[in-house]
Amino acid sequence: MEKSEKEKWILAGKIGKEARDFGISLAEPGAKLLDIALAIEKKISDAGAKPAFPPNLSLNYFAAHYTPKFKDATELKKGDLLKIDVGASVDGYLSDTAATVLVGGGENKVLDAAKEALSNAIKKVKPGIRIDEISKTIEEAIRGKGCNPIVNLGGHGIERYSIHEADFIPNIRGNSSHMIKKEGAFAIEPFATDGGGYVVDSPEVQILMLVETKPVRSQLGRQILDFIASEYNTLPFAKRWILEKFGIMAELELKPLVSSGALYEFNVLKEQQNGNVAQFEHTLLIDGNEVTVTTE
Ligand code: MN
Ligand code: MN
């Protein structure tokens, strides 16, 4: 790997880690989710980077893909299980990292299960390891705590300007013989739950992503699409970022952009049985025989 390229992966990791930890420090009873998201975004931009995706601040049985909506008034309560999932982009080189907080403190079995699964999985990673070995380690750690892994979420490869790439790293053992990639970045992200272990789409959408630019009839729609292409490229963005820039009328312009295939919507994911969900995630970089956890 080129030295300049490696330095950008490492820097994106460091900024992502600092933004994650800053978010955790703000997660107190009474804190507003929107304020935490804005503080994380500012931390990333003050460090000279951009968000790799909107900060995901998903509560309790929501597993992922919730970022505060425009003027979101949600406040944290004692006992909330908050997943903070953030990433930074340095010239398109990305990080992706998450931690779970039990708001107001205390013990939580689901949180412990996901945390231990990530720690055990990272210890296993070496060049040439089979993905299935990582999955098995995650599954055993989570089941060992009396919880269930979420079977349809998992880790993934990361490429420049693309946060989700092959290979998928499941949170349960399968029968894949795939090896971890020889060079480049990937994320490991165990999700544990006291529910059944399966997430489904909820109707809500707060995060979208550009698929391809298409001709747009409406003038405002065209402006919005041009802005998305130049500002976010193919990285996910928050609906609230568009409403802040173009006003609340912009919401009406997004639907046709989705219907035409220009934009993709990430539905908020919820645990099917409304089980509580915890997640921990790190980005790792493999370069020859060297493994670096960039977000640790
Ligand atoms: Mn993530
Ligand atoms: Mn991820």
Image (spheres, rainbow, N blue to C red):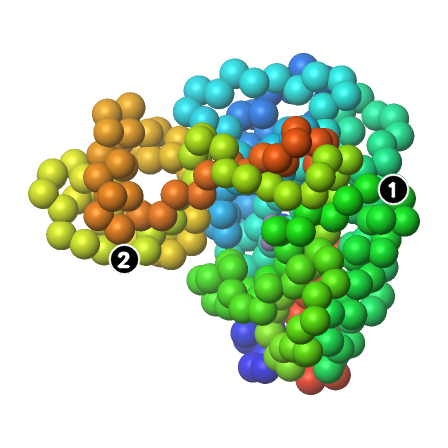
Q: Position of residue 126 (x, y in %)?
A: 78, 76
Query: Does 71 appear above or below 45?
Result: above
**The CB of the residue at mark 1 lies under 8 Å from ligand 1:** no
Q: Secondary structure at mark 1?
A: loop
Q: Position of residue 187 (x, y in %)?
A: 64, 60
Label 1: few (<14), some (14–19) or many (≥20) C-alpha neighbours in 10 Å: some
Location of residue 109 by image quarter: top right
Label 2: few (<14), some (14–19) or many (≥20) C-alpha neighbours in 10 Å: some
Q: Secondary structure at mark 2?
A: loop
- Residue at (43%, 34%) from the top-left corner? 205
Query: Does 249 appear above or below 257?
Result: above
Task: Using the image as rendered, state which of residue 138 and residue 282 is in the foreground.
Answer: 138
Q: Position of residue 68 (x, y in %)?
A: 50, 29
Q: Is residue 40 visible?
A: no
Q: Is residue 79 visible?
A: yes
Query: Does 280 appear above or below 72?
Result: below
- Residue at (57%, 50%) from the top-left corner? 87
- Residue at (44%, 20%) from the top-left corner? 71
Q: Position of residue 81 (x, y in %)?
A: 72, 29
Cβ–Cβ below 8 Å for labels 2 and 1?
no
Q: Mark 1 belongs to which amino acid?
A: Gly
Location of residue 250 by image quarter: top left
Q: Count how many numbered circles sit on residues in the image.
A: 2
Rendered-image quarter of ligand 2: bottom right
Q: Quadrant of the N terminus?
A: bottom right
Tell me which numbered mark, 2 or 1, is placed earlier along the sequence: 1
Residue identified by numbered label 2: 212
- CA gap, disc 2 and disc 1: 44 Å
Task: Using the image as rendered, state which of residue 274 and residue 155 is in the foreground.
Answer: 274
Q: Mark 2 belongs to which amino acid?
A: Glu
Task: Using the image as rendered, state which of residue 45 and residue 188 is in the foreground.
Answer: 188
Which disc is residue 146 wearing?
A: 1
